[in-house]
């Protein structure tokens, strides 16, 4: 344990990122490539289960055609529990992500049973992934009832209502604790404003229910206000969650960047995914301490179409674009994103879930042609 | 002569709004006026409750209002208001503003706790003639109103760490499930969906689901299914026609009701209310925007339709169905014609203009 800390400190000092037990927010860095040499960037890839390997293959093919300087390090979920992590993910996989600082994860099916932690929970706790970022924008050419969606939801991922602290007080009475801390709220607010500034966004809205939960959401809002003062060029507003839900379904163009605690974030980010066409098209990225970014596809592993070359790789592709943007390879990211959007907009090659009849390979080749 | 034929002609021509012939047989004395507590509330509340008063008078409905002034920044609900509601058993209310972070607990919550109004009901539906992105929406959201995340039990553990307790009890979950299935049974609804997050909050929402399942087994003719709240919000914005009656704990109900209201056209016309074993309070269904903002107040352009439709629900609750039918028919006709609509429905009229149109359309 001590040797790990020494190793981590030595590594971080070498790359210029400061990390200590109580990080000071002015020194915090969110980018993974400070001081990285311009050459191949190593990234961890978890293909996952079910349709995972097929869509990961699509991503690798497209990245090769687009000439991205990414070297993939593939890791698979093991078949037995690793005692060091108490789950099916091995210690080496986690170390790989910690070392490379970027990763891409396909859908993973958590095996049913007891005695081990869920895979997503393991990743979140071990890598300290504190913010979940989902950019939601309408895909031109794929018609849903909403055409003008362009927003980003940033959700606090570690505490709040999902702390998992429940107990039965007496028979028939259950209590569940919702925990909000200053540290976690400041952390996610800092990331939200940094993201807004880095991507040229004008407005950040904090979503809350502080009129009823005065102390908990009140603390969250206080932290957001403190961070907002440091970014005077970005407009900051606070919206009560019931107002937010109604405005989102009536007029989603009103929102830009949304930052919220865990539970509201879960519901609102899935609502926004529904606005643009579902989880099969939504990119997502988890940000961890020390600039770790793990992009992932949030849909399921779809075991019924696994291996049949029918899967839609859009979610994983757009997530990998988010990963490229985090690495500040904006031109490559734009090229791939434009190619994907153009292919979907044309409508000639679409997979089954978008209403077309193409296979995964046809769709991928069409995207490569557009690059 | 023309005064009598005009409504008959209108009946024949507007087959879409058939007025029901009076088939219910009242007991002698049912027609004597019933007292109803009226709380105008904050913001645009007085404006819309005034609209209801005007319409009730024009219809000569057998209700009279006992008005009480309650504002959102009061520390507590005045005891005479509670006395009045306990005596009359029925109340009509405008919006009460809950100050954000002010240290004052919500008066809405206090009313609900004191009178034990454990079920909150919102009926979200498409109004004919009003274009929205989603059609075929007809959802009733029944939400547990007293416990759950809004129990109000918070404390600061150490500076910078705050805890809030979410309490779920079998007693409350059971009675809300019973109310939901009873509502579905009495209103000829086919399906009840329980909304939860029991994959994460296994004990708390698990207890809620257990109660729902127990009650569902007693109503075999009503379909029952369960849906996780994030999937539910996704389905609401893509395929809302699959939902009929939804029963939820407190927080999810708030979000689901406002989302459902939004997809059907906005909270400006969704009726609803809170009901308990002994009392009922009727108000604008979904809570977003029921107090309005200053611009609406100054320009007097608040939408009275939600409160009018809620007062129609109240009339049915008091067993005056023909008055309720007349009111609803007039309101729906005005909205469908499209000339008199407030800003949130796409028009630009003031509250008074809408009310005048409704009064002109009353039979």
Image (cartoon, grey):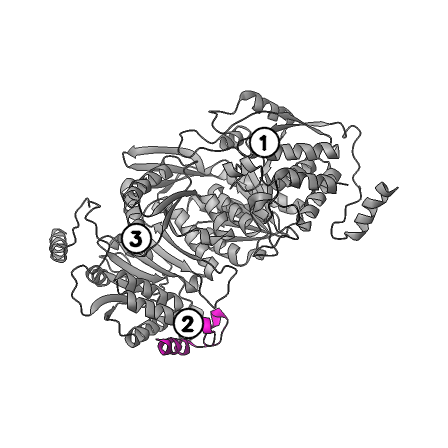
- What chain does mark 3 sit on? A
Gap between marks 1 and 2 measured at Cα: 53 Å
- Give the answer, above or below, for where B143 lies relative to B127: above
Give the side of residue B11 with respect to residue B152, left or right.
Answer: right
Q: Are marks 1 and 3 on the same chain?
A: no
- What chain does mark 2 sit on? A
- Give the answer, above or below, for where B221 lies relative to A315: above
Location of the C terminus of chain A (image quadrant) = bottom left
Residue A352: image location, x then y, percent: 48, 72
Q: Which mark is residue B46?
A: 1
Residue A24: image location, x then y, percent: 19, 44
Gap between marks 3 and 2 measured at Cα: 27 Å
Considering the numbered disc 3 on the image, is that residue within a helix, a strand or a loop?
A: helix
Label 2: which residue? A342
At label 3, counting other C-alpha atoms closer than 10 Å, the crowd grade (few under 14, some 14-19, many 20 or more) is: some
Residue A25: image location, x then y, percent: 22, 46
Q: Which residues are magenta?
A: A345-371
Label 3: which residue? A197
Label 1 with label 2: CB-CB less than 8 Å? no
Residue A311 visible? The answer is: no
Considering the numbered disc 2 on the image, is that residue within a helix, a strand or a loop?
A: helix
Label 1 with label 3: CB-CB less than 8 Å? no
Q: Is residue B316 magenta?
A: no
Give the side of residue A107 with respect to residue B85, left or right.
Answer: left
């Amino acid at each position: 344990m001590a040797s790990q800390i020494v190793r981590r400190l030595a590594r971080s000092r070498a790359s210029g990122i400061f990390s200590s037990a109580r990080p000071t927010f002015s020194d915090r860095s969110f980018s993974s490539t400070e001081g990285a040499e311009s050459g191949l960037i190593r990234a961890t890839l978890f293909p996952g289960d079910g349709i995972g390997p097929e869509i990961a293959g699509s991503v690798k093919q497209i990245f090769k055609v687009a000439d991205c300087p990414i070297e993939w390090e593939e890791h698979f979920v093991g078949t037995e529990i690793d005692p060091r992590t108490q789950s099916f993910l091995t210690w080496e996989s986690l170390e790989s992500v910690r070392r490379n600082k970027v990763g891409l994860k396909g859908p993973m099916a958590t095996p049913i049973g007891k005695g081990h932690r869920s895979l997503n929970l393991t990743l979140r706790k071990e890598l300290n992934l504190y913010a979940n970022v989902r950019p939601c924008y309408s895909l031109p050419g794929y018609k849903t009832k909403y055409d003008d969606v362009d927003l980003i939801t940033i959700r606090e991922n570690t505490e709040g209502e999902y702390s998992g602290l429940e107990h039965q007080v007496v028979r028939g009475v259950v209590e569940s604790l919702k925990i909000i801390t200053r540290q976690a709220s400041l952390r996610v607010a800092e990331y939200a404003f940094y993201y807004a500034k880095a991507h040229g966004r004008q407005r950040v809205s904090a979503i809350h229910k502080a009129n009823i939960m005065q102390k908990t959401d009140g603390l969250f809002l206080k932290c957001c206000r403190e961070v907002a003062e440091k970014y005077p060029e970005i407009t900051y507003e606070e919206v009560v969650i019931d107002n937010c839900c109604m405005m989102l379904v009536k007029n989603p163009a009103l929102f830009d960047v949304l930052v919220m605690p865990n539970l509201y974030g879960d519901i609102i980010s899935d609502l926004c995914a529904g606005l643009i066409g579902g989880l099969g098209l939504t990119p997502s990225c988890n940000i961890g301490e020390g600039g770790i970014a793990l992009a992932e596809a949030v849909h399921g592993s779809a075991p019924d179409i696994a291996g049949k070359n029918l899967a839609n790789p859009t979610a994983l592709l757009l997530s990998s674009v988010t990963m490229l943007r985090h690495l500040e390879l904006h031109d490559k990211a734009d090229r791939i994103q434009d190619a994907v959007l153009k292919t979907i907009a044309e409508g000639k090659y679409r997979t089954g879930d978008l209403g077309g009849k193409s296979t995964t390979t046809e769709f991928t080749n069409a995207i490569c042609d557009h690059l | 002569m023309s005064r009598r034929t005009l409504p008959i002609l209108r009946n024949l021509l507007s087959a879409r709004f058939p007025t029901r012939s009076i088939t219910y047989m009242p007991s002698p004395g049912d027609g004597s006026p019933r007292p109803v507590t009226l709380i105008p509330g904050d913001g645009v509340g007085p404006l819309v409750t005034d609209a209801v008063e005007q319409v009730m008078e024009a219809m000569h409905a057998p209700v009279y209002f006992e008005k009480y002034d309650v504002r959102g920044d009061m520390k507590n609900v005045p005891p005479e208001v509670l006395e009045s509601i306990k005596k009359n058993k029925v109340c009509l209310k405008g919006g009460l503003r809950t100050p954000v972070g002010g240290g004052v607990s919500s008066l809405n919550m206090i009313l609900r706790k004191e009178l034990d109004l454990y079920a909150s009901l919102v009926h979200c539906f498409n109004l004919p003639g009003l274009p929205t992105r989603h059609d075929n929406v007809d959802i009733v959201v029944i939400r547990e109103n007293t416990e759950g995340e809004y129990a109000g039990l918070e404390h600061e553990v150490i500076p910078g760490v705050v805890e809030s307790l979410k309490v779920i009890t079998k007693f409350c979950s059971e009675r809300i499930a019973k109310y939901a299935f009873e509502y579905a049974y009495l209103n000829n609804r086919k399906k009840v969906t329980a909304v939860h997050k029991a994959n994460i909050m296994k004990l708390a929402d698990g207890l809620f689901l257990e109660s729902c399942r127990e009650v569902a087994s007693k109503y075999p003719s009503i379909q029952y299914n369960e849906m996780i709240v994030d999937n539910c919000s996704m389905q609401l914005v893509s395929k809302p026609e699959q939902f009929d009656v939804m029963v939820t704990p407190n927080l999810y109900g708030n979000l689901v009701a406002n989302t459902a209201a939004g997809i059907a056209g906005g909270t400006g016309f969704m009726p609803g209310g809170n009901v308990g074993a002994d009392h009922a309070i009727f108000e604008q269904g979904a809570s977003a925007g029921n107090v309005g903002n200053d611009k609406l107040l100054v320009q007097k352009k608040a939408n009275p339709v939600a409160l009018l439709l809620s007062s129609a629900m109240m009339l049915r609750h008091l067993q005056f169905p023909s008055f309720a039918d007349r009111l609803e028919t007039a309101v729906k006709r005005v909205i469908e014609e499209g000339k008199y609509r407030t800003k949130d429905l796409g028009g630009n009229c003031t509250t008074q203009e809408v009310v005048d149109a409704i009064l002109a359309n009353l039979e």
